[in-house]
Amino acid sequence: MKLSKLLGGLPYGNHDVEITSITNDSRKADKGTLFFCIRGTNVDGHKFAQAAAHSGAAAVVVDHNVGIDCQVIVPDTRIAYAKACSEFFGNPKDKLKIIGITGTNGKTTTAFLIKSMLENMGHKTGLIGTIHNMAGDKIIPAENTTPDAFKLHSLFDLMVKEGCEYAVMEVSSHALDQERVYGLEFAAGVFTNLTQDHLDYHITMDNYIAAKRKLFENCKVAILNGDDVYFEKMQNGIKCPIVTFGVNSNTDYVAKDIEYNPSGTRFTLTGKAQGKITTQTPGKFSVYNAMSSACTLIALGFDFDKVCEALSVASGVKGRAEVVPTGRDFTVLIDYAHTPDGVENILSAVNEIKKGRLVTLFGCGGDRDRTKRPIMGEIASKLSDFVIVTSDNPRTEEPSAIIEDIMQGVKDKTTPYVVIENRAEAIRYAIQNAEKDDVIVLAGKGHETYQIIGTEKRHFDEREVVLEALNELKN
């Protein structure tokens, strides 16, 4: 494809070269490559412009003069990269109805529910998100919640080739801030909720809110959680039609007659019509996830009764309130809760259904927002009968230092606790000391089957550790 076509008529020098690949990684720049210099959080890609040129890159896209012959200067390399990646694959985004979901918690579950509902109603659907990406039934591994622009548009291309009509995607605040989804038109944009997270990147909650709100700048209809404390700030400035949902507020759609039980939740969805909904996960947070999913499809014109029916048979999501079979008189739940709100949601849900103790095992990720650690410790202590503080993905931080931050919110509480740094040993301790009717919540890892220690990603599947610990009990 010609450089001029990829860059949409921007000035491209004295000759229009053929481009065979696009990258923002200078290590992948070679003959025929169009290399984009992106200013990252830690590294500025402009530092590698000369190296890319020396490697044979056909052209290097920059935002200022770097003194090389093959440079193309643009106002914003992130936006130019997004546009070029879409063009490179033939703009497959324009052949899909894209549903974008943003928020601190609930994105993954909502995305899976919407995909399941659409396919239950006969519409082949792609998925982009935290656990994995999908083109219909085809699974593609995921590295980020929202991939970079090249990967994103390659996924859209695969979805189109696989015959997908819809694409449901989680849209992270990082992706919005970094223009990874620039140029996408969303058939619907969904806001699940907003709580403290990623302040290591955004610095302030106002910045975080502003990043999330960008989803609705190019959106045909917005579906917003009217109960959320940041609802007013989130809806401010949205120009498309807004549909609201909630439990406690005067919203377009309201959940009434809510019933919680260990196997799921039942409620009545009321709005323009009324219908019964059953979910396969317990707790109030599952009501919000279900409502956001249902209201999205209703807003897109799907029949109310068919939406309720499709939602009630939608399957659960791995690592989200996932019950691990034990064959014992206690329950083990695995949940991805890794934020203060996420921890509060899953523990509050368990407290609504438990008969015995609630035992919470959790840690916090390294090289991430430190301020949420004591908050998570305090919430776990407040809502649990016993707390096990351990490691999560320490990355390049010392696990003991992370635990020390967590303990600021734990040690002054009356709730009994134990600190076991090694997560596998902590899980074994929880299993070995479980009592009748206990619910043990393993929070933080969820769908992940690895642990990041230093810069190494090591295999670590909590389901396997639980099984090993159960087998040890038999011996």
Image (cartoon, grey):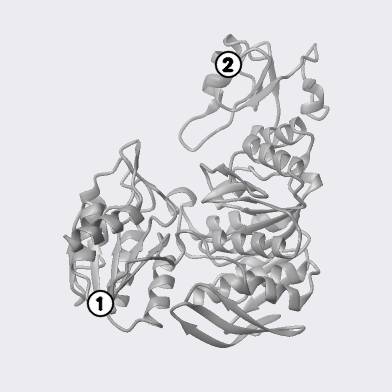
Q: Vertically, is 373 above or below 146?
A: below
Crowd class of label 1 (few under 14; some 14 to 19; many from 20; radius 10 Å): some
The quarter of the picture where residue 354 lies is bottom left
Q: Which mark is residue 52?
A: 2
Residue 227 appearing in the image: no
Quadrant of the drawing holding the N terminus: top right
Q: Which mark is residue 385?
A: 1
In front: 339, or 375? 339
Query: In the image as oriented, which residue stretches furthest toward the bottom?
Result: 257
Residue 204 in the image: x percent, y percent?
48, 56
Residue 113 in the image: x percent, y percent?
61, 64
On the picture, is 411 further left or further right than 53?
Answer: left
Residue 291 in the image: x percent, y percent?
63, 74
Q: Vertically, is 29 above or below 391?
A: above
At x 48%, y 83%, the residue is: 260
Q: Amino acid at mark 1?
A: Asp
The quarter of the picture where residue 79 lies is top right
At x 57%, y 70%, the residue is: 289
Provide the secondary structure element on which disc 1 rests. Answer: loop
Provide the secondary structure element on which disc 2 rests. Answer: helix
Q: Vertically, is 440 above or below 95?
A: below
Q: Earlier in the sequence, mark 2 or mark 1?
A: 2
Label 2 and label 1: CA atoms lie apart by: 57 Å
On the picture, is 293 further left or further right than 429?
Answer: right
At x 55%, y 26%, the residue is: 25
Residue 219 in the image: x percent, y percent?
75, 57
Quadrant of the drawing holding the C terminus: bottom left
Q: Amino acid at mark 2?
A: Ala
On the picture, is 376 further left or further right than 256?
Answer: left
